[in-house]
Image (cartoon, rainbow, N blue to C red):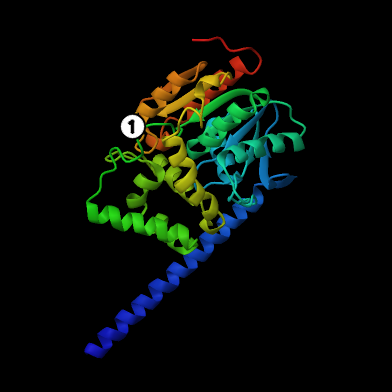
Amino acid sequence: MADVRVVLVLLGIAVAGAAVAVRYRRDTRAARARIERSGSRVARTDYGRIAYARAGDGYPVLAIHGNAGGFDQGLLLADWSIDPGFQVIAPSRFGYPGSPMPPNASVAMQADAYAALLDSLSIEQAAVVGYSAGSASAIQFALRHPERLSALVLVEPVAPGKGPGKGLVMPRSASIIFTLFTIFTISLKSDFMYWAAITYFQPVVEGPWAGVPPGKRLTPDDKADIRVLLSSSLPVSVRADGSSFDTYVSTPGLLSASESDYPFGSIRAPTLVISAVDDPLALHENARALVEKIPYARLQAVPGGGHMLLGHHEEVRQGITEFLRSTVASPPQPR
């Protein structure tokens, strides 16, 4: 009888494993098909290949993706927040799909690469929307190429001040395990481990990885949006180099930025900073302080929704649309 039970257990494990494998292959095929459907192109520049995708017509807007992103995530975030009346140009930053990590890469070099991309597209000037970790290179573009920038939008930006973690307190043992798991996933470029985490443990990872405030009651639409965003990082193996750079170089550098690294006071482009008051990753207090540092900046405070601005996409889209329409054709006025 014991032998029968053992056989049944092993059979159950085998069936469950097969089902997991089938689902994993299906989801990874869908992720790669999504990237192919994005219609990306490659610009060859002095900074290497830069992959990018374009959508829409009208005034050009560079949409700079966040950590674990790429041109495909840039298109997704732009779809949530930028009116289709604008032309979106979504590049992959260094180390993300189609844009190899160059030797001695830096955030400043990434900003120069955006200028090279605009040159290749014969675009003299554009607005820039930087999302989350993409804010570092968006700000450097404003500092290094002010003549190419008509307006700057920073959505849930990394900004000097306290690091993430407010409201994301976990027991010490769980925090250590989660940190080790994240490092292990990135360092091994494990598509399967990342997929397993977002597929079977979404409620666990949606806080640290998607910036969902603890205790937030999620609607079905919220859960769907979280799933879409987390899935946009598949396959993670082609994003690991860029994600490591963001995690260990770009984001820490901006959080602790000195005035010599980021002279915010010299930014002259009209600037809109959008920040949710309950964002546990890019803290709202940092965003408020950033607005005070940039002469022509103003803040759109969102009353909730966390890092993903859940439930407020239309409100954010309207704010960005009104800002761009009022600034790209007229000079800024100081506060």
Q: Quadrant of the N terminus?
A: bottom left
In the image shown, does 241 or 37 lie closer to the viewer? 241
Give coordinates of residue 282: x percent, y percent. Answer: 40, 35
What residue do we see at 64% from left, 24% from top? Answer: 146
User: Could you tell me which secondary element the residue under label 1 belongs to?
Assistant: loop
Q: Indicate whether 264 appears above or below 94.
A: above
What residue do we see at 48% from left, 45% from top? Answer: 249
Q: Indicate whether 109 appears above or below 322.
A: below
What residue do we see at 25% from left, 48% from top? Answer: 170
Tell me if 52 is positioned left or right of 3 in this view. right
Question: Can residue 83 be seen here?
Answer: no
Q: Indicate whether 187 appears above or below 8.
A: above
Tell me if 211 is positioned left or right of 154 in this view. left
User: Local crowd at mark 1 within 10 Å, few (<14), some, or many (≥20)?
Assistant: many
Question: Can residue 178 be seen here?
Answer: yes
What residue do we see at 32% from left, 51% from top? Answer: 204
Residue 174, by quadrant, is: bottom left
Disc 1 residue type?
Asp
Q: Indicate whether 325 appears above or below 35.
A: above
Give coordinates of residue 72: x percent, y percent. Answer: 59, 46
In the image shown, does 200 or 206 lie closer to the viewer? 206
Q: Residue furthest front?
A: 260
Query: Which residue is tagged 1?
Result: 278
The mark tally for this picture is 1
Give coordinates of residue 300: x percent, y percent. Answer: 44, 21
In the image shown, does 192 or 220 lie closer to the viewer? 192
